[in-house]
Image: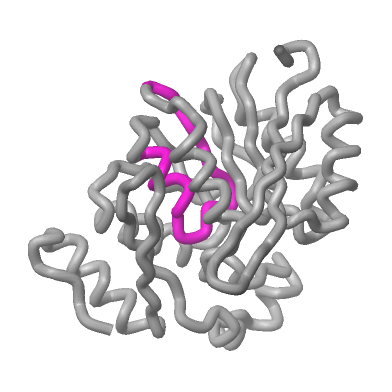
Amino acid sequence: MNSPNTGAGGETEQLYEALAGEYDLDEKHYTFGAHSFSFLSVLDSYALLDRISPEEFVKDEQMPYWAEIWPSAITLSTFIADELPLEGKRIVEIGAGVGMASIVAAWKGASVLATDYSLEALRFIRYNALKNRVKVETERLDWRLVQCREQFDLLFAADVLYERVNLLPIVYAIDKLLKPGGAAFISDPRRRLAEQFLELAGENDFSVTPLVREYRTGTESVAVNIYRLMRSAESP
């Protein structure tokens, strides 16, 4: 793949060259809200499995899911671009991956903190924000032990409900990160684990509103739900 234009800025080019030296890269273009975006990801995320030592896997069981752009992230980004007024809002994304939803939210006028447990992911978020000419803050965040003291108007997450052990920690993370009156939007391809997550959310005083969506590209069609979570006492 060709290097980006030097007009994109010296920092962008330097970061691209650093990433290209470590990964086989894939850059794709998407349109959200009639605006064209470019996102860099890893060509083959399974190739990254060799980077994970047995010791690291035993400690965190971290898989390189961050390295791909999933239908849930595209669906959430479409929803953000088309349906959410974000001007002046303060937003956090957890499990941000390469930062698609965060970057679209920043383009919509939000102040955004994109977080992921993977330090590798944060580098891709930084590059994608620079390439798309938006400002996005990045920070490492472990939803099992949220140390961020700031609270946010909105929280976004795409495709994070894939391990049972993470479901309750994600509920607690949402509770800790949302301001009073805040809302979380969790995008998921209707996994069975999502049902367990919603039960846990209800048990922890969140009300849930499912927004039914579908991701289509070519012959591919993926059913995706976006779940809006609000504390029950604050629901409209």
Colour logic? one colour
Position of residue 40 relative to residue 116, above or below, is: below
Q: Residue 149, located in which quarter of the rendered image? A: top right
Q: Is residue 228 left or right of residue 82?
A: right
The quarter of the picture where the N terminus appears is: bottom left
Image location of residue 124, percent across then percent down: 39, 63
The quarter of the picture where the C terminus appears is: top right
Position of residue 88 relative to residue 138, above or below, is: above
Pick whichever, 91 or 145, lies toward us: 91
Q: Is residue 76 left or right of residue 232?
A: left
Image location of residue 130, percent across then percent down: 26, 54
Residue that sits furthest to the front in the current view: 219
Residue 212 seen in render: yes
Residue 234 part of the magenta-drawn span: no
Pick whichever, 100 or 142, lies toward us: 100
The residue located at (40%, 82%) in the rendering is 23
Point out the stretch of residues depicted in magenta.
88-106
Residue 123 seen in render: no
Position of residue 224 relative to residue 40, above or below, is: above
The residue located at (69%, 32%) in the rendering is 228
Q: Residue 3, located in which quarter of the rendered image? A: bottom left
Residue that sits furthest to the left in the current view: 7
The residue located at (31%, 80%) in the rendering is 20
Image location of residue 186, percent across then percent down: 67, 42
Pick whichever, 220 or 101, lies toward us: 220
The residue located at (71%, 43%) in the rendering is 212
Residue 101 part of the magenta-drawn span: yes
Q: Is residue 35 left or right of residue 47?
A: left
